[in-house]
Amino acid sequence: MEEISQFRSCKTKIIKQSRTFTFLELKEVKELVEKARVILEQSFTEEKDEAIIEKIKEISSV
């Protein structure tokens, strides 16, 4: 349950930031962020997960 709320919080930040550097409307950015999450989940193995999570945490804390 905690992971879901963290994802939603992070997702909101990503959407807001994405809108600042794209010409996409809110709906388009939301779709893009959701598709990216699904693609990333399908693309990576458990070995890579920790390194990816750390990098994303570094980015989102900036």
Image (cartoon, grey):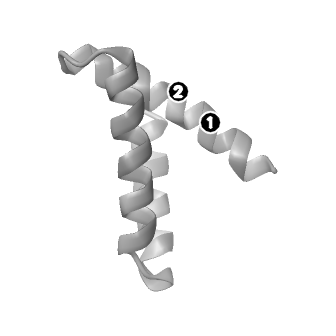
Q: Name the residue under label 2.
A: 12
Question: In which quarter of the view is residue 23 placed?
Answer: top left
2 in relation to 62, above or below: below
Whether the residues at callouts 2 and 1 have beta carbons within 8 Å, the answer is yes
Q: Nearer the viewer, residue 32 or 55?
A: 32
The residue under the point 62% across, 32% down is: 9
Q: In which quarter of the image is residue 15?
A: top left
Q: How crowded is mark 2: few (under 14 residues within 10 Å), some or many (20 or more)?
A: some
User: What secondary structure is found at the residue carrying circle 2?
Assistant: helix
Q: Is 39 drawn above or below residue 4 in the view shown?
A: below
Q: What residue type is labelled 1?
A: Arg
Q: Quadrant of the C terminus?
A: top left
* 17 vs 42, nearest the viewer: 42
- Residue 43 position in % (x across, y down): 35, 73
Q: How crowded is mark 1: few (under 14 residues within 10 Å), some or many (20 or more)?
A: few
**Image height of 44 relative to 61, above or below:** below
Instruction: Please give the name of the residue rendered at 19% of the width and 20% of the height, measured from the top-left corner.
Output: 22
Residue 49 placement (x, y as % from top left):
48, 72
Q: In which quarter of the image is residue 27?
A: top left
At mark 1, the secondary structure is helix
Residue farthest right in this picture:
1
Q: Left of 19 or right of it: where is 52?
A: right
**Residue plotted at (35% across, 50% down):** 36
Q: Which residue is drawn at 24% across and 19% down?
A: 24
The foreground one among 37 and 60 is: 37
Real-space Cα separation, disc 2 to disc 1, in angstroms: 6 Å
Q: Nearer the viewer, residue 26 or 53?
A: 26
- Residue bearing the label numbered 1: 8
User: Which amino acid type is marked by label 2?
Assistant: Thr
Q: Where is residue 51 in the image (x, y as percent from the top left)?
A: 43, 69
Task: Say whether residue 5 is left or right of residue 38.
Answer: right
